[in-house]
Amino acid sequence: MKTVTCTAPVNIAVIKYWGKRDTELILPTNDSLSVTLSQDILHSKTTISASKDYTQDRLWLNGKEEDITKNRRMHNCFRETRALREKMEQADSTLEPLSTYNVHVCSENNFPTAAGLASSASGLAALVYTLAQLFDLNVTVSELSRIARQGSGSACRSLFGGFVAWEKGEAKDGSDSMAVQVAPESHWPELEALVCVVSDAKKGTSSTEGMQHTVQTSPLFQERLNIVPGRMEAMKKAILERDFQSFAELTMRDSNQFHSVCLDTYPPIFYLNDTSRAIIQLVHAYNNSSPDGKLKAAYTYDAGSNAVIYAPKENMREIIQLISHYFPSQDAATYFTDPYNVIAGAPLGQD
Ligand code: DP6
């Protein structure tokens, strides 16, 4: 029996992935770019063992056994990594035939239980990375990201730290649709993220389902596809130059546009709630109060109501005070600071 344990971080997109051109291979309609949050606060931890004595593949998620036969995406990740291992075994007959063994997978998230943060990115990234270690695969991280992409699109970006682009690619078979690192986490240590937990309720419309409704019904979405390429270039430049003004404006504009195409979907998809919108107003009011007219913080929202606020470290204390003042938590708010770039907050209370 061989057992391996690995962790993978959460990533939060600043240029959003929303829409697939191939739902089976998970090929996106546009490039996207994310910031990987520190693993010390938020991560998925996966242990996988392979044994010739196991009679079937089995999966436990957060301590509860799940029916793995229903999980096609996970199967795709098993199939791809086993095929790579099989090739190695064919080339070297002294290798243990791990590709023929069944596996037991045990995965859990260390997120504050109430966080309600998307976990598919870190979860699937941890799965694929752990399989690669288990099978001793000799492949690049970008190659692995191509496999993780088939588990959940955003998972491909969680295989890297720092600032990560997912290039949509052009090939029909997805061979050029993978993640690349734009800059490592050490590049911009002054940039921090505050995770504001607005609601821990499960979202009404899953990303997978919602984005295809958008592709099928939103005319505004077609316009977004013309806008994203320019934004990607501008965002990469802003990151490389550590230009918070451009980074912040692009981040907020892209979040707003993503939620606009959700609203333009027919029937519309609502991810933001009153608290989310109030946080948007608060961040704009805070930015407007800046004496030199400079942006001090930027919000972004995924397919849910929780806010992530990016800001230079020097502003973070003030932002936490503002948020705690206007959105007092039911529980005492505990914020964890971190040497890298994430601060996770306690729930802000439900609306
Ligand atoms: C709004 O990666 O969860 O978070 O590929 O269907 O698994 P699937 O979708 P998923 O979508 C994430 C959408 C998003 C934006 C982003 O992370 O880029």
Image (cartoon, rainbow, N blue to C red):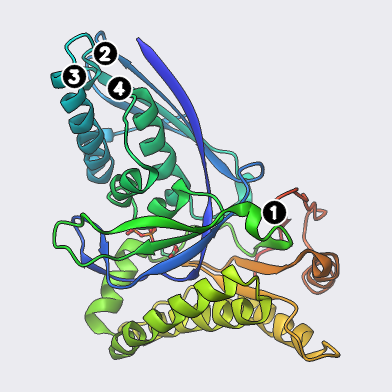
User: Upstream in the sequence, badge 1 or badge 3?
Assistant: 3
Q: Which mark is residue 89?
A: 3
**Three-letter amino acid code of the residue under disc 4:** Val
Ligand 1 location (quadrant):
bottom left
Taking 58 as reference, is 296 above or below it?
below
Q: Which mark is residue 235?
A: none
Residue drawn 21% across and 54% down? 175
- Tell us which disc is closer to us: 1 or 3: 3
**Three-letter amino acid code of the residue under disc 2:** Tyr
- Tell us which disc is closer to us: 3 or 2: 3
SS state under label 2: loop
User: Upstream in the sequence, badge 4 or badge 2?
Assistant: 2
Q: Are marks 1 and 2 in contact (CB under 8 Å)?
A: no
For disc 2, the marked residue is: 54
Report crowding for label 2: few under 14, some 14 to 19, many 20 or more residues within 10 A (C-alpha). Answer: some
For disc 1, the marked residue is: 344
For disc 4, the marked residue is: 103
The image quarter in which residue 172 lies: bottom left
**Real-space CA distance between mark 1 and mark 3, rounded to the nearest whole angstrom:** 44 Å
